């Protein structure tokens, strides 16, 4: 039987290389604190400027600057070698299911899923525990993995469309269909023939 490669191939890692629930919570707490720090500094700056230099309301500009800083931090910095503070302290990085650095478009889409749904962050965290590769729903839809910094792929497999129906959602996204690694993995991390 021929294997379908119409969606291309994706990489997969050892199960312990995927960032689990605890690491994800640590990252969320640290990066949220960093963004709140920037927002509070922006609020102080806005108040100072309005009090001492201009007589107009600068709230719209402050909101636009805050959104811009958030976008830069959660997309450009997060996907770069520098990584966010939360990613650095939790020793994780983000990669695409193809094994390369995710594009800015994917990272923006992933951030928008966090901000606008289809689910809230609690459902996203519960999903990590049920998912084989510890992906959140937004990771699944954006085609990304959050993995340990030093993780290397142990193989490639064809991407197939995976479908989930539950909690009022019907989701479909590409996912590598890799062999069952629990039975066939050698000490070096390769698959036995």
Image: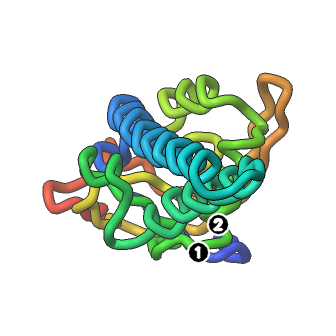
Q: Residue at x 32, y 68 (%)?
A: 82
Q: Residue at x 73, y 47 (%)?
A: 59
Quadrant showing the N terminus = bottom right
Q: Position of residue 112 (x, y in %)?
A: 71, 52
User: Does residue 100 sit above or below 142 in this rendering?
Assistant: below
Residue 160 located left or right of residue 14? right
Q: Residue at x 58, y 43 (%)?
A: 47
User: Does residue 76 sit above or below 172 in this rendering?
Assistant: below
Q: For this rendering, which residue is in front, 43 or 94? A: 43
Residue 118 located left or right of residue 186? right
Residue 100 located left or right of residue 138? left
Quadrant showing the C terminus = bottom left
Tell me if mark 1 has few (under 14), some (14-19) or many (20+) residues whose alpha carbon lies within 10 angstroms of its own. Answer: some
**Which residue is label 1 attached to?**
103
Give residue 26's mark.
Answer: none
Contact between labelled residues 2 and 1, with CB atoms less than 8 Å apart: yes
Q: Position of residue 147 (x, y in %)?
A: 36, 53
Q: Position of residue 17 (x, y in %)?
A: 30, 50
When asked about the image quadrant of residue 117, the answer is top right
Secondary structure of the residue carrying numbered label 2: helix
User: Does residue 127 sit above or below 163 in this rendering?
Assistant: above
**Which residue is label 2 attached to?**
106
Q: CA distance from mark 1 to mark 2?
A: 5 Å
Q: Is residue 180 visible?
A: yes
């Amino acid at each position: 039987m021929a294997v379908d490669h119409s969606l291309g191939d994706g990489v997969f890692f050892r199960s312990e290389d995927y960032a689990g629930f605890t690491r994800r919570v640590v990252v969320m707490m640290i990066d949220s604190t960093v963004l709140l720090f920037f927002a509070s500094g922006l609020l102080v700056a806005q108040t100072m400027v309005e009090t001492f230099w201009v007589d107009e309301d600068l709230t719209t500009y402050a909101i636009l600057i805050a959104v811009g800083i958030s976008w830069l931090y959660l997309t450009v910095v997060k996907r770069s070698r520098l990584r966010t503070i939360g990613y650095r302290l939790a020793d994780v990085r983000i990669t695409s299911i193809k094994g390369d650095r995710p594009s800015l478009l994917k990272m923006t889409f992933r951030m928008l899923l966090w901000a606008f749904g289809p689910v809230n962050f609690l459902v996203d965290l519960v999903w990590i525990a049920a998912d084989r590769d510890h992906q959140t729903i937004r990771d699944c839809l954006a085609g990304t993995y959050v993995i340990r910094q030093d993780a290397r792929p142990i193989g490639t497999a064809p991407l197939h469309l995976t479908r989930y129906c539950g909690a009022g959602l019907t989701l479909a996204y590409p996912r590598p269909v890799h062999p069952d690694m629990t039975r066939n993995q050698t000490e070096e991390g390769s698959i036995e023939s």
